[in-house]
Amino acid sequence: MSVVARQGFKYSIIGYLGFLLGTFSVLVVFTHDLEFYGKLRYVLSTAEMLVPIVVFGLSFSNVKFFHQTFKDKKHHNFLSLSLVFIIVNFLVLVGLYFLINYLFPELKFSEIWKMKRLIFPLILVLALSTVFGKFVSNYKRIVIPSIFDNLFPKIANLGAFCLFFFLHFSEKSAYAFFIAVFFLGLVGISIYTNKLEKIKPDFKLNYFTENNLWKNILNYSFFGFLGNIGQFVALRIDNFMIVEFLNFELNGIYSTLFAVISLISVPAMGLYNISTPIVNKHIAENDFEELDRFHKKTSLTLFFVGLVLLSCIFVGFPYLANFMKNGDLLKQFEPVIWIVGVAMLFDLATGFNGHIISMSKYYRFNIVVMLFLAATTVILNFIFLKYTNLELLGIAIAYAVSLTLFNFAKIIFNYWKFKVFPLSFEMMFASIIATLAITSSITILPEFESNFLNLICKPTVVLVFFLIGNYFLKIFPIEDFLNKNFLKSLFKMKRP
């Protein structure tokens, strides 16, 4: 079995372990104090939204220019200079932030000003970790980094919450633990990078100035920065605006619902990371026919797995909420699950559309659609929060509309320029199976008095429908992932 399948599968295992830890936290812990959980989510989301400003696209450039710098044995030189630039850029960001707040004192009433001592250190830690993570992906190794990227944030949230709510530590102590866990993640990813290939610090500029390579890097990084900040603003602005317009408790509710539905995207994170160098290779060789095959195959995989999980969530969430503290409050916002879930599923169906554009000579187009996504999300969020009483439902609608338009734009562009298309008839057949499965589970299967029995039986009916439908229609090659050779390959730990 290829390194892509092996690493992708292992990454998914780590992802699901993180999801299980997160699910435990949501079911047993976070719902005890949705307000404090909302604060933790606000700090992390706001930091992640500002990280692209500090990184300035250098994480993507460390992938884009890796083959060239590796061939010239200057990849560590590029990594070293990238890290220095990030530190300098962070200091500039901090200086500008304080200058703006000095010029406009009314901004000091915002929550971001009140929590600046938490948000800004976290920005630097996440920015450095991002560059190391992308650098490691060039070696087709994403499993160990996923531990720091996926599990550590869960540990940070859970540990900080337990310290505050159950052990009665002060908020300051809980926040200190929160930041410390992310710092340990940075230390861990840097050590792992050095283990793959000993890091050789090199801060000389000669290689980049003599052949004017720095101009290409700066140009690509700048447009990568614009696209990346558009993406992060679009995906993280929800938590920020909910707090600024509503309150921390509703932010905790939205974050809880979003965490549940995010289960369907866990396999995608690993596959996207490991696929980026492969996409880059096909584009460099102008092998768009093979790229189209790879695109369709991965898109179908992500869609099918995501559809199965989403269908189980749809039929099981009302009973899952009954086991959660404040479950009745969460069920009031159940439509958020359906709206966001469908939008996420379509995003999975489009595969790595954005990666294809980013790695091509048309990467500037990604900037246009990313900024459009960010602007649309912010405007729609503002309209729904300011002029309607929809609250979280409005946030969900804004998210779904923006993300769907964003994906349509990328599909059309990639087909126009590269003749690659992610959607297939197999997806339609799978959708029919899902519709029958959900309908049968909700309307035909009787509802038991036991919530636990309902939580088990209704998703089981969905799984049976998918197994039978897939057996006859041959939509997804399950047998490729359930054989002896593949399972054995998961435990091979070869160096690159």
Image (cartoon, rainbow, N blue to C red):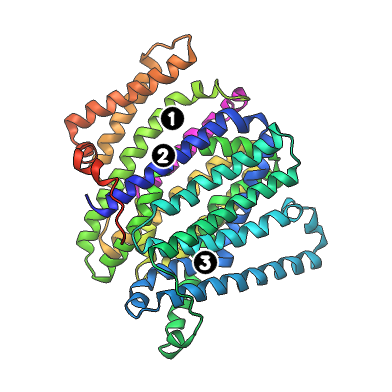
First in sequence, mark 2 or 1: give its number: 2
Q: Mark 3 = which residue? A: 226
Identify the mark at residue 264; answer none if there is no mark: 2
Instruction: State the separation of the CA atoms marked 3 and 2.
Output: 27 Å
Instruction: Give the camera-side residue of 478 and 348.
Output: 478
Label 3–label 1 contact, CB within 8 A: no
Task: Look at label 3 and name its amino acid.
Answer: Leu
**Residue 2 at x, y = what percent?**
23, 53
**Residue 13 at x, y = what percent?**
38, 41
Label 2–label 1 contact, CB within 8 A: yes
Q: Mark 1 = which residue? A: 313
First in sequence, mark 3 or 1: give its number: 3
Drawn side of residue 169 relative to residue 83, left or right: right
Q: Main secondary structure of the magenta part?
A: helix
Q: Is residue 232 magenta?
A: no
- Give the answer, above or below, for where 400 lies relative to 60: above
Task: Look at label 2 and name its amino acid.
Answer: Ile
- Give the answer, above or below, for where 94 lies relative to 340: below
Quadrant of the drawing holding the C terminus: bottom left
Drawn side of residue 474 relative to residue 234, left or right: left
Magenta residues, start to end:
327-350
Task: Look at label 1 and name its amino acid.
Answer: Ile
| Few, some or many residues within 10 Å of mark 2 (<14, 14–19, 20+) | many
Q: For residue 364, say whether it is visible.
A: no
